[in-house]
Image (cartoon, rainbow, N blue to C red):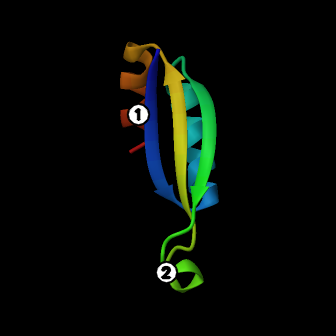
Amino acid sequence: MALGMIEVCGFVTSIVVADAAAKAADVKILALDKNKPAAGDAAEVPLIMIVKIGGEVSADAIGLPVTH
């Protein structure tokens, strides 16, 4: 099993990315993790999200590029 991670800005973007990866390949969405930048609310985008997907190596190799 392979693990793929995609870092995006904003919650809605993370949902769109997770949806695209799941539809493009046989992968599972393992987690949506949130991180707040050091600048906090003063940052241009106050929330950084990490989408974690898992599956076979070939599936991850298809699912990740589709999200870009």
Residue drawn at the location 45% of the way across and 39% of the way down: 5
Residue drawn at the location 54% of the way across and 17% of the way down: 26
| Amino acid on which disc 2 is placed | Ala
Determine the image quadrant of residue 59: top left
Mark 1, residues whose alpha carbon is within 10 Å: few (<14), some, or many (≥20)? Answer: many
Residue 11, percent from left and from top? 63, 58
Residue drawn at the location 36% of the way across and 23% of the way down: 61
Q: Which mark is residue 45?
A: none
9 or 41: which is nearer to us?
41
Q: Earlier in the sequence, mark 1 or mark 2?
A: 2
Q: Where 39 sits versus 24, above or below?
A: below
Residue 62, percent from left and from top? 39, 24
Q: Where 53 sits versus 38, above or below?
A: above
Q: Which mark is residue 64?
A: 1
Residue 50, percent from left and from top? 52, 48
Question: How far is mark 1 from mark 2, CA to CA?
Answer: 28 Å
- Location of the C terminus by quadrant is top left
Determine the image quadrant of residue 28: top right
- SS class, disc 2: loop
Q: Which residue is mark 2?
A: 39
